[in-house]
Image (cartoon, coloured by chain):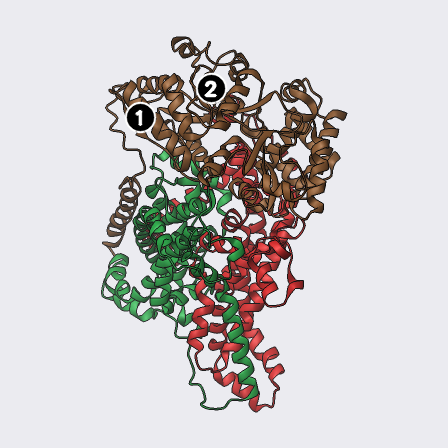
């Protein structure tokens, strides 16, 4: 288990072992076939999405879902862009501060709870962690009233607040797991030198936290970008993020424009997909640490 | 005398030790305390009133406490029972699906293979997509028309000669919700795969070698060495996936409609109650969901908390 | 260790401050761009869900008239897209609760307003009716339907739609050996032809998701119970558990048996399109469907026909979009100016011509309107007017939600007729 814990909060290198060359046994061929079959299955929705997004109005109908476009057109992409780009801008405005603040708080918490032992630290951690599991519906009604009462404007400000608050448990978890792997001697050395908790954090721990920060930022970015529940309750199509705008585009329009909806779905997923493609190892690191507890 | 002083000094030191960290934790503690625990209590109190109308919601009409009546009414109503049944069905299928497929993928990719990175990336990318975005295309795929009018997966089955597989997907009142689990499985199997893969890789090679040297068959190797090592991971995966399924809302809003009886789940009920100004019932549904989650999560948290202490 | 507590305290405060700043900081476009000079009459924020299509066209036309009639008041467009109004309704609910109302908002006239009235969120506008001289130019039936229990009226309708209309594809009927001009005296006559269509292999009746099924239900109730019996359902004088209702529900069940199986995943434009494309023969839909036909250059009488649901001739099942005066509106003067335009002859003419509905006023010159609209306006003047169930005129939101749930349950096969009837009765008792 320790091997897995070492990976917590770090980019994952799943220890790819060198593949033995040129032994095409039946077993291996079979494996490749099964894997490829699964690839096809997984890509089925992507095919439909892509193909439909390039189709013109009459062409983009459910009964023609599997056919290639009669005429390839980029009109849908243009329409989707002009409809969704304000929402995408707002989503960026929301996600970046939310990710940064919750990462910072999580890092502070994780450090304190893992390395600066005090009586009850574990209990406090468990209490915080519970917040990650609650269904948000269980607090939605009073939450609505609280946010209204605090005077936080609906839309981006509310969503930043919410994603920060409800991101604290998971970011704390990831950082705590990460800091558990920091050698105690490092901390002790700083303490012996007379550094207080904050100084230890700022000068010793923070600089080595970069990998974990990347993991947390990516995780928070993705989860805030894809959130819909909070968006529905705390914003509107005028001031809300792209998930809300996309749902309106796809499900709310008076006359369904499938080509535009599909292009819109692809647009809305582009940022997270990009993050995943470019920073995949960190992404996986986040997945792991999010679930493997010390 | 000396021991008493030392004990007092020890206590003071403990307080001083706890003081600084707690202060640093204070913002998070306050936020979590209010936004999680405080609101849970507020929600529970709201659910124990008869605040069912707009007039009451704005204070124009009085609300009175009704204890557990809302819960009894809800749990006794056929519609909510249907929601709960749907939720259980959905969760079970979702869990089983992701665990089996995720494990299968991890197992297939565990042994060295060319192009492993490629396969891993493909299986994992659906996780980056939001449920709303994937719902746009899955709505089409899960269209319930069959035969001539078929589109979506039904049409695909026709095209590849698997006509018999056609069915009405989510349009089925008793098991329609299972169809909604399919996009969820598609999106999250990769996550389970990543967990199991890391689990597999985390098992020291020596352990496997030792077992093989001892003459253990492949099956025995899995049963006595690998599975036990993987069980904590499997447990984590179950917990994470399980609690995600209880929150199922986005997919249903995107693929089906809130009004549809076939795909009712508590999370959607809550939204409908809220839109109809029925705040007490909305709050009650929320608390019910919380209790369901807590039944599973709390023991798990207690168990790992005790493990930490050791 | 000595400096630690102090620095930790500073850090804690800094963290909380940063959070507070971020939360209360950038506005992010959350509020409408009203300059809010608090004058009361210099602008009006109009909150609607008319953000696209013919509805937007109608709104634009109305704004033009408004600018002419009230050049000193600035129009601020608060339209919210999505969900055919559900997004807008959700947002409105939030804003009203936060006591941040728009200057005026769109709502369906009739019982849907009851929740707002109970919550003391809108003002009565009965005196405006006198001031603008509307009482004489609205049909008396309509005035009855608009008046709430306390004797006041709470909104001014901008347009009228009719919900009990059948649309048909004439070619499909001809191909199946049915006379496309046939008139049906009641539902059973119609069902005979529906059976014929089913045998011919075409979908007899196209319908979409839950609310369109509720709309179908209301026209069946209207047909079988008559105007008085139907209206009695909402004021308690008709017994929901009685045999007439049972018979009507049986008819509803039969009709649903003639509908397309994928209905629950469709919205009304898609079911309408089934008829336009010739995949289905009939559909029951409000006359906003007319806009689809116009857009696709279909001709009334050649490609399609429109007639009252069999058994409801002489009855106009109405719904109306209307505008309200919220309590605490930032610019009540501007709101009143808007309401005046909405109720004015020029305003109603411009709006309805562009939107495809008909004016609530009976004194508008209809000669420049389309053929269907002219016939609808004639019917409106002379027919008995009843309130639509599915569109918020007959019952408040909570009742409609309960009815919709019961209907969805029934049509998806989870309850039988008896259960359906008792659930409907329970929904209306509360």
* Disc 2 from disc 1: Cα separation: 19 Å
Q: Chain of mark 2?
A: C
The residue nearer to you, when weighing C42 against C95, is C42
Secondary structure at badge 1 equals: helix
On the image, the x and y values in percent for residue C229 come to 68, 20
On the image, the x and y values in percent for residue A239 come to 34, 41
**Where A289 falls versus B39 (above or below)?**
below
Write down which chain is painted brown.
C
Q: Which residue is mark 2?
A: C360
Cβ atoms under marks 2 and 1 closer than 8 Å: no
- Mark 2 nearby-residue class (10 Å; few <14, some 14–19, many ≥20): many
Secondary structure at badge 2 equals: loop
* Residue C80 as seen in the image, left or right of residue C86: left
Residue B179's tag is none
Q: Where, by quadrant of the figure, is residue C408 drawn? A: top right
Q: Where, by quadrant of the figure, is residue C423 drawn? A: top right
On the image, the x and y values in percent for residue B248 come to 53, 50
* Residue C420 as seen in the image, left or right of residue B256: right
Residue in view at x 55 percent, y 20 percent: C379
**Where C372 falls versus A64 (above or below)?**
above
**Where B195 falls versus C408 (above or below)?**
below
The residue nearer to you, when weighing C264 against A136, is C264
Question: From this viewpoint, is residue C49 visible?
Answer: no
Q: Colour of chain B?
A: red
**Which of the image's four quarters has the C terminus of chain C?**
top right
On the image, the x and y values in percent for residue A172 come to 39, 57
Q: Chain of mark 1?
A: C
* Residue A162 as seen in the image, left or right of residue C35: right
Q: Which residue is mark 1?
A: C64
């Amino acid at each position: 288990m320790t091997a897995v814990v070492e990976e917590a909060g770090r980019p994952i290198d799943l220890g790819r072992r060198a593949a033995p060359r040129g032994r095409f046994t039946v077993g291996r061929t079979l494996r490749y076939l099964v894997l490829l079959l699964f690839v096809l299955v997984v890509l089925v929705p992507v095919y439909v999405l892509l193909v439909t997004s390039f189709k013109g109005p009459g062409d983009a109908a459910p009964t023609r879902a599997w056919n290639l476009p009669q005429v390839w057109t980029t009109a849908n992409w243009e329409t989707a862009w002009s409809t969704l780009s304000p929402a995408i801008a707002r989503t960026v405005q929301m996600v970046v501060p939310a990710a940064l603040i919750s990462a910072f708080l999580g890092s502070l918490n994780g450090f304190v709870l893992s390395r600066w032992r005090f009586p009850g630290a574990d209990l406090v951690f468990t209490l915080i962690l519970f917040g990650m599991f609650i269904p948000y519906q269980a607090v939605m009604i009073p939450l609505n009233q609280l946010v209204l009462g605090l005077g936080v404007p609906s839309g981006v400000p509310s969503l930043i607040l919410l994603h920060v608050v409800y991101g604290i448990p998971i970011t704390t978890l990831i950082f705590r797991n990460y800091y558990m792997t920091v050698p105690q001697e490092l901390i002790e050395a700083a303490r012996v030198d007379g550094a207080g908790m904050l100084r230890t954090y700022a000068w010793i721990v923070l600089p080595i936290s970069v990998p974990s920060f990347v993991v947390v930022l990516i995780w928070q970015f993705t989860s805030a970008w894809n959130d819909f529940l909070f968006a529905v309750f705390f914003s509107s199509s005028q001031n809300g993020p792209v998930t809300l705008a996309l749902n309106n585009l796809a499900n709310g329009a008076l006359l369904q424009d499938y080509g535009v909806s599909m292009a819109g779905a692809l647009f809305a997923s582009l940022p997270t997909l990009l993050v995943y493609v470019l920073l995949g190892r960190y992404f996986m690191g986040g997945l792991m640490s999010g679930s493997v507890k010390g | 005398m000396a021991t008493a002083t030392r004990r007092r000094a020890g206590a003071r030191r403990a307080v001083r030790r706890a003081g600084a960290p707690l202060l640093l934790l204070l913002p998070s503690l306050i936020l979590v305390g209010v936004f999680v625990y405080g609101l849970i209590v507020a929600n529970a109190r709201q659910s124990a009133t008869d605040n069912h109308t707009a007039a009451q919601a704005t204070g124009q009409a009085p609300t009175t406490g009704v204890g557990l009546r809302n819960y009894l009414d809800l749990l006794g109503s056929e519609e909510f029972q249907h929601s709960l049944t749907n939720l259980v069905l959905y969760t079970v299928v979702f869990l089983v699906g992701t665990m089996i497929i995720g494990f299968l993928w991890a197992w297939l990719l565990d042994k060295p293979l060319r192009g492993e990175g490629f396969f891993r990336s493909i299986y994992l990318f659906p996780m980056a997509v939001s449920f709303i975005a994937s719902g746009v295309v899955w709505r089409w795929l899960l269209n319930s028309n069959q035969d001539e009018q078929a589109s979506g997966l039904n049409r695909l089955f026709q095209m590849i000669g698997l006509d018999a597989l056609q069915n009405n997907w989510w349009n089925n009142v008793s098991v329609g919700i299972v169809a909604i689990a399919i996009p969820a499985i598609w999106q999250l199997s990769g996550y389970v795969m990543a967990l199991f893969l890391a689990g597999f890789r985390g098992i020291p090679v020596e352990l496997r070698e030792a077992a093989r040297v001892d003459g253990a068959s492949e099956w025995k190797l899995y049963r006595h060495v690998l599975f036990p090592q993987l069980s904590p991971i499997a447990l984590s995966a179950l917990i994470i996936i399980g609690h995600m399924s209880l929150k199922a809302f986005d997919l249903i809003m995107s693929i089906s409609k809130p009004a549809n009886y076939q795909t009712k789940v508590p999370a959607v009920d809550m939204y409908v109650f809220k839109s109809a100004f029925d705040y007490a019932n909305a709050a009650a549904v929320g608390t019910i969901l919380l209790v369901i989650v807590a039944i599973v999560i709390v023991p798990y948290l207690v168990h790992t908390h005790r493990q930490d202490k050791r | 260790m000595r400096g630690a507590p102090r620095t930790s305290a500073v850090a804690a405060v800094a963290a909380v401050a940063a959070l507070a700043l971020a939360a209360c900081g950038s506005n992010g476009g959350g509020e409408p761009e009203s300059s809010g000079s608090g004058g009361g009459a210099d602008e009006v924020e109009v909150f609607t869900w008319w953000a696209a299509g013919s509805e937007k066209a109608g709104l634009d036309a109305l704004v033009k008239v408004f600018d002419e009639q009230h050049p000193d008041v600035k129009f601020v467009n608060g339209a919210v897209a999505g969900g055919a109004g559900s997004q807008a309704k959700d947002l409105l609910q939030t804003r009203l609760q936060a006591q941040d109302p728009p200057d005026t908002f769109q709502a369906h006239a009739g019982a849907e307003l009851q929740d707002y009235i109970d919550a003391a969120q809108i003002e009565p506008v009965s005196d405006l009716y006198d001031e603008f001289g509307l009482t004489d130019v609205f049909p008396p039936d309509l005035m009855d339907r608009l008046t709430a229990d306390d004797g006041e009226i709470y909104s001014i309708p901008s347009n009228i739609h009719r919900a009990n209309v059948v649309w048909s594809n004439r070619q499909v009927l001809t191909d199946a050996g049915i006379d496309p001009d046939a008139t049906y005296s009641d539902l059973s006559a119609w069902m005979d032809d529906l059976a014929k269509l089913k045998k011919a292999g075409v979908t007899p009746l196209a319908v979409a998701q839950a609310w369109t099924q509720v709309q179908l239900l209301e026209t069946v109730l209207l047909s079988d119970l008559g105007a008085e019996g139907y209206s009695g359902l909402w004021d308690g004088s008709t017994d929901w558990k009685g045999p007439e209702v049972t018979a009507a529900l049986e008819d509803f069940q039969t009709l649903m048996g003639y509908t397309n199986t994928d209905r629950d995943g469709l919205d009304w434009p898609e079911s309408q399109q089934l008829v336009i494309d010739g995949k289905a023969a009939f559909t029951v839909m409000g006359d906003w469907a007319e806009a689809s036909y116009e857009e696709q250059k279909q001709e009334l009488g050649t490609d399609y026909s429109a007639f009252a649901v069999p058994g409801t001739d002489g009855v106009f099942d109405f719904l109306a979009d209307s505008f309200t005066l919220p309590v605490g509106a930032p610019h009540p003067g501007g709101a009143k100016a808007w309401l005046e335009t909405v109720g004015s002859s020029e305003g109603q003419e411009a709006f309805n011509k562009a939107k495809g509905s008909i004016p609530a006023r009976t004194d508008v010159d209809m000669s420049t309107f389309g053929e269907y609209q002219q016939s609808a306006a004639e019917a409106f003047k002379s027919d008995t007017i009843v309130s639509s169930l599915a569109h918020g005129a007959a019952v408040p939101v909570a009742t409609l939600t309960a009815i919709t749930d019961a209907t969805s349950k029934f049509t998806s096969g989870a309850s039988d007729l008896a259960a359906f009837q008792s659930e409907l009765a329970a929904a209306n008792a509360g």
